[in-house]
Image (spheres, grey):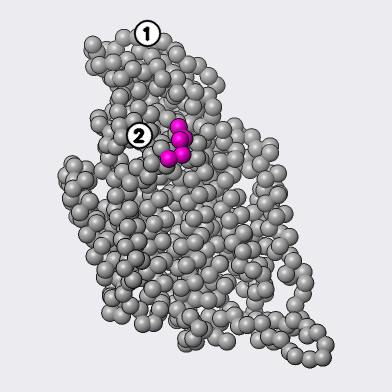
């Protein structure tokens, strides 16, 4: 009854046990179903062990939905949404975890129940903000909606894109959404963008199951690996973005490749399947600047074993070819403009590795805690993967250790705005999650003790995930007044206007970005930021100087929250600038609300 990873209908040495067919005894009376325990003995099944997971799933979902009725969003602090979620939310999440582990231990339960648990986990984690917030969260999601809108208006490349010109170089995700809007007749992607995290994570379930089932038939490792993936995916790159889209395609390509590699002998590709995979690679190359390099790195390592080359080399050639072709033609302007920075990054690999691990001194105390918890969880998952590699010898004969290492190769290449170490963790997560599941959930002696330890570890992972994912919600969420203030500004601002803000944390300020310019204080030089802290009035006058059109100043609650949480500027910067604007002659208030204020400069210093 034993079969190892990669086996399909034949045994392999050293792998986890494959579940055998149900055993029946022919007799003159109706046989009693029997099931194998972890010790190899047979005992009659308990009915409650079959029905418990079926009852817990709907109960947990119901409790979760009811818990969201009285959430007071305005009470968020250092830890964001975590501070306002009621006890019943946490109870529902704990109940779901216990029910999932019970479902894993019950082999008679159909796979659709396990899929239901995983989709319920996705809903609890990612649908909670969408259900609670009156507007789309996260300013980058609003930015991407503005890009889709601009590409629709210009029927392609957006002229005068300024700082957002990078999206003209990698437009695949935006072109796809523009096509979707044209086909459906929808006015804007704003109607569905709030549900992008749920959508992308739910779609990842298919490729992850294909990837893990290609390695082993042990349902506990397969489904448990997916649960760990969702529980450890704290990086938060699943919002409405090219990265979320490209990552989905990345996992899909690797899942199909690994499936092919596990067939013996691993051969070449049927032409239709090869064309589909090449199409996915092209979509990745034209949608995101980092993901094609991650794919090339993964395929390169997979091609090292000679037995894999017939399968991997055609796709590696395609990935390299598409990436080089795209970067040397469509994306050439961006790469040429940033060539010096790229060369400097290649010469400073140590700075790339540690760029995302600095700058916590001025952050809010709660955010310092969150940063260390996230780093600890990331390191802990790699430690579990290494232990699995050592204590589960069969994992060494799978492609997953190579897939776990592949993203780390790019750490030396670029810091990616200080995010490279976190992106590397994200791209290695499908492999490290499986290896962790192989260590924690494979059959082992003393099953009760193992179950208790696994329950605690999974609960800790979920807690770390929510800390990383929801702790900045006081700056990521936008109140209706903030949305109204920005909409009023953009609607009134004629072409050539200048919009000033403390941070870029505004909902929709990039709408019609091709028609106006933005000045964001926390993105200025060190001297400009120091001037803002020392003399807000002088900094404001300087920001408005030499404008060729109307100038607007937008101050919001979310900007103040970002300054406090991240320490990018002193926590009182927005309040001090608000006071300076009130005292500065020549400014008129065009919007005043509980969460936002907008000023228009009636005259500009040195302007025309």
Query: Residue at (70%, 64%) from the top-left corner?
Result: 53
Which quarter of the rendering shows the N terminus?
A: bottom right
Of marks 1 and 2, which one's residue comes earlier in the chain? Answer: 2
Q: Nearer the viewer, residue 311 or 476?
A: 311
Query: Looking at the image, can residue 87 be seen?
Result: no
The reply to whether residue 24 is in sight is yes
- Overall secondary structure of the magenta section: loop
Query: Quick one: which residue is furthest to the right in this view?
Result: 29
Which residue is at a point 31% across and 34% down the rendered structure image? 155
Vertical arrangement, residue 134 with respect to residue 603, above or below:
below
Residue 497's spot in the image, x, y percent? Answer: 31, 19
Quadrant containing the C terminus is top left
Provide the residue span drawn in magenta. Answer: 183-187
Task: Please check the rendered image and state whether residue 186 is part of the magenta-colored stretch, yes or no.
Answer: yes
Where is residue 159? Give x, y as percent.
25, 31
> Horizontal placement of 465 versus 551: left or right?
right
Q: Is residue 430 above or below residue 346?
A: below
- Image coordinates for residue 22, horizontal then vertical, percent: 66, 82
The residue drawn where x is 67% and y is 51% is 61
Indicate yes or no whether the magenta region holds residue 419. no
Mark 2 Cα shell of 10 Å, populated few (<14), some (14-19), many (≥20): many
Residue receiving disc 2? 152
Kindly check if marks 1 and 2 are in contact, taking CB atoms under 8 A apart as contact: no
454 relative position to 195: left or right: right
Q: Which mark is residue 585?
A: 1
Residue 60: image tag:
none
Q: CA distance from mark 1 to mark 2?
A: 40 Å
Percent across and percent down for residue 344 are 19, 50
Looking at the image, residue 322 lies above or below residue 43: above
């Amino acid at each position: 009854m034993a079969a190892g990873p990669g086996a399909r209908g034949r045994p392999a040495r050293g792998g986890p046990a494959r579940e055998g067919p149900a055993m029946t005894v022919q007799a003159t009376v109706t046989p009693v179903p029997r099931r194998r325990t972890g010790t190899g003995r047979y005992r009659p099944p308990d009915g409650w062990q079959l029905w418990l997971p079926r009852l817990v799933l709907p109960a947990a979902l119901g409790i979760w939905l009811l818990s969201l009725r009285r959430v007071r969003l305005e009470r968020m602090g250092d830890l964001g949404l975590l501070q306002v979620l009621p006890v019943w939310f946490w109870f529902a999440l704990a109940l779901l975890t216990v029910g999932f582990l019970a479902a894993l231990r019950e082999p008679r339960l159909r796979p659709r129940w396990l899929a239901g648990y995983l989709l319920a986990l996705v809903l609890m984690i990612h649908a909670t903000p969408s259900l609670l917030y009156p507007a789309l969260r996260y300013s980058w999601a609003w930015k991407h909606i503005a890009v889709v809108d601009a590409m629709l208006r210009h029927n392609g490349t957006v002229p005068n894109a300024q700082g957002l010109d990078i999206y003209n170089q990698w437009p695949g995700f935006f072109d796809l959404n523009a096509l979707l809007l044209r086909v459906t007749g929808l006015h804007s992607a704003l109607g569905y963008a709030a549900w992008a995290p749920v959508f992308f994570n739910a779609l990842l379930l298919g490729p992850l199951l294909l990837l893990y089932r290609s390695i082993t038939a042990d349902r506990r490792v397969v489904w448990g690996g997916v649960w760990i993936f969702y529980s450890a995916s704290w990086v938060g790159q699943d919002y409405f973005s090219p990265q979320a889209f490209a990552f989905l395609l990345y996992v899909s390509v690797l899942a199909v490749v690994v499936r092919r590699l596990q067939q013996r002998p691993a051969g070449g590709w049927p032409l239709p399947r090869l064309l589909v995979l090449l199409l996915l690679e092209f979509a990745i190359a034209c949608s995101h600047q980092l993901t094609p390099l991650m794919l090339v790195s993964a395929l390169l390592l997979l091609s090292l074993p000679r037995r894999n080359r017939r399968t991997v080399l055609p796709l590696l050639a395609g990935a390299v070819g598409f990436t080089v072709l795209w970067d040397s033609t469509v994306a050439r302007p961006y790469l040429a403009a940033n060539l010096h920075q790229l060369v400097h990054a290649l010469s400073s690999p140590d700075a790339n590795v540690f760029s995302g691990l600095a700058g916590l001194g001025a952050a809010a105390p709660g955010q310092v805690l969150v940063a260390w918890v996230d780093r600890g969880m990331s390191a802990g998952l790699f430690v579990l993967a290494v232990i699995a590699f050592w204590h589960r010898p069969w994992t060494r004969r799978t492609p997953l250790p190579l897939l776990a290492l592949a993203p780390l190769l790019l750490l030396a290449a670029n810091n990616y705005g200080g995010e490279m170490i976190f992106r590397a963790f994200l791209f290695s997560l499908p492999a490290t999650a499986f290896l962790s599941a192989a260590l924690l959930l494979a059959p082992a002696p003393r099953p009760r003790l193992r179950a208790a330890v696994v329950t605690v570890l999974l609960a800790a992972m979920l807690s770390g995930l929510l800390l990383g994912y929801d702790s900045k919600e006081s700056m990521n969420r936008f109140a209706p007044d903030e949305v109204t203030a920005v909409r009023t500004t953009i609607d009134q601002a004629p072409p050539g206007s200048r919009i000033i803000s403390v941070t870029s944390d505004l909902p929709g300020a990039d709408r019609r970005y091709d028609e106006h310019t933005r000045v964001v204080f926390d993105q200025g030089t060190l001297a400009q930021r120091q001037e803002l802290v020392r003399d807000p009035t002088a900094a404001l006058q300087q920001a408005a100087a030499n404008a060729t059109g109307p100038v607007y100043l937008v101050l919001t609650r979310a900007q103040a929250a970002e300054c406090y949480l991240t320490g990018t500027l002193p926590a009182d910067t927005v309040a001090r600038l608000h006071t300076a604007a009130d005292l500065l002659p020549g400014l008129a208030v065009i919007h005043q609300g509980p969460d936002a204020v907008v000023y228009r400069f009636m005259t500009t210093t040195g302007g025309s």
